């Protein structure tokens, strides 16, 4: 069991690394193109164009910097350390990690956090892993112009993190299978995302559930026990 978790973690890290390198190539190609263009300007128009290229290049370097930094944070933090954590803060981290990708693919990524959501006990990186996996799945399922919404709120004796999308939905006959390891409907999917989410949720004494309407929408819920710990941040 412990061995399986380690194996899944490694696979997930590998996948994260693949995503990172893929994502880094876009801003790098912007930089390369701009640098190739910039020689001494001959006209006023050229000078204006060059200034724009420089601004673009700066933005591209910032993007690379933030991608690398966030990935290092993500990898370093797998220490298994447990503390009182804010689901809203973790959800916002995931948002910042994926917003560029969403924008590039012309999908809306929306944050909707209730005020004073109680803290939960857990490992922030593992919970971050859940949010990133769920949002990635929702983005994959959504068409251009679609939306993915990340929510946190309190509901009775639970604290909930919800990821909603208006994407393809999940076929009835596949609903029982999506948590199975290696079940995937994607050409490049590993089918591990939800299996890992489920293990992390179990470890946190949380419940991972979903409802879906095929052809219309999907909502995933991670319900943590509410220990009544206030978030005063
Ligand atoms: N929000 C969603 N909308 C529609 N289908 C979904 C959604 N989330 C999951 N699925 C379905 O569940 C399957 C399993 O998801 P899971 O995250 O485990 O693997 P994957 O996304 O296919 O691969 P990977 O996570 O490695 O990219 C997906 O292939 C997809 O068919
Ligand atoms: Mg997935």
Image (cartoon, helix red, strand yellow):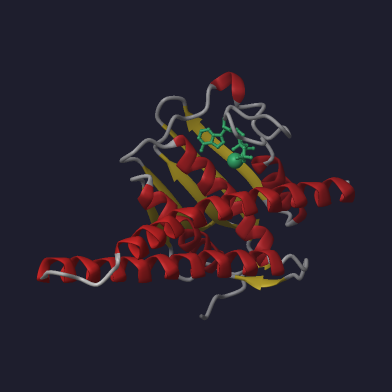
Above or below — where is 62 with respect to 210?
below
Above or below — where is 198 with respect to 84?
above
Residue located at (36% from left, 45% from top):
107
Residue located at (68% from left, 35% from top):
179
Q: Residue furthest left?
A: 44
Ligand 2 position by quadrant: top right
Residue located at (47% from left, 59% from top):
95
- Nearer to the camera, 152 or 26: 26
- Nearer to the camera, 46 or 23: 46
Query: Residue 146 is drawn in which quadrant?
Result: top left
Q: Position of residue 102 (x, y in %)?
A: 41, 50
Q: Position of residue 161 (x, y in %)?
A: 54, 54
Q: Position of residue 120 (x, y in %)?
A: 64, 66
Above or below — where is 180 with respect to 137?
above
For residue 203, side relative to residue 100 (left or right):
right
Q: Is residue 166 visible?
A: yes
Q: Residue furthest top?
A: 173
Q: Is residue 122 visible?
A: no
Residue located at (49% from left, 32% from top):
212
- Nearer to the camera, 40 or 147: 40
For residue 20, side relative to residue 34 (left or right):
right
């Amino acid at each position: 069991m412990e061995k399986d978790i380690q194996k899944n973690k490694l696979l997930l890290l590998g996948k994260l690394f693949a995503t990172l390198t893929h994502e880094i190539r876009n801003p790098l190609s912007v930089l390369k193109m701009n640098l190739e263009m910039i020689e001494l300007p001959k006209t006023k128009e050229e000078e204006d164009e060059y200034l724009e290229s420089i601004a673009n290049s700066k933005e591209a370097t910032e993007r690379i910097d933030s991608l690398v930094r966030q990935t290092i944070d993500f990898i370093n933090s797998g220490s298994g350390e447990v503390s009182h954590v804010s689901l809203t803060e973790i959800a916002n981290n995931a948002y910042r990690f994926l917003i560029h990708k969403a924008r590039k693919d012309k999908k809306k990524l929306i944050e909707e956090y209730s005020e004073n959501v109680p803290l939960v006990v857990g490992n922030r990186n593992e919970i971050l892993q859940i949010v990133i996996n769920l949002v990635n799945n929702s983005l994959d399922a959504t068409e251009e112009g679609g939306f993915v919404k990340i929510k946190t709120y309190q509901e009775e004796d639970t604290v909930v993190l919800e990821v909603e999308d208006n994407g393809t939905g999940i076929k009835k006959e596949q609903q029982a299978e999506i948590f199975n390891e290696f079940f995937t409907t994607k050409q490049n999917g590993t089918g591990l995302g939800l299996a890992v989410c489920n293990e992390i949720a179990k470890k946190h004494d949380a419940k991972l559930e979903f409802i879906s309407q095929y052809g219309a929408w999907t909502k995933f819920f991670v319900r943590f026990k509410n220990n009544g710990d206030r978030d005063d941040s």
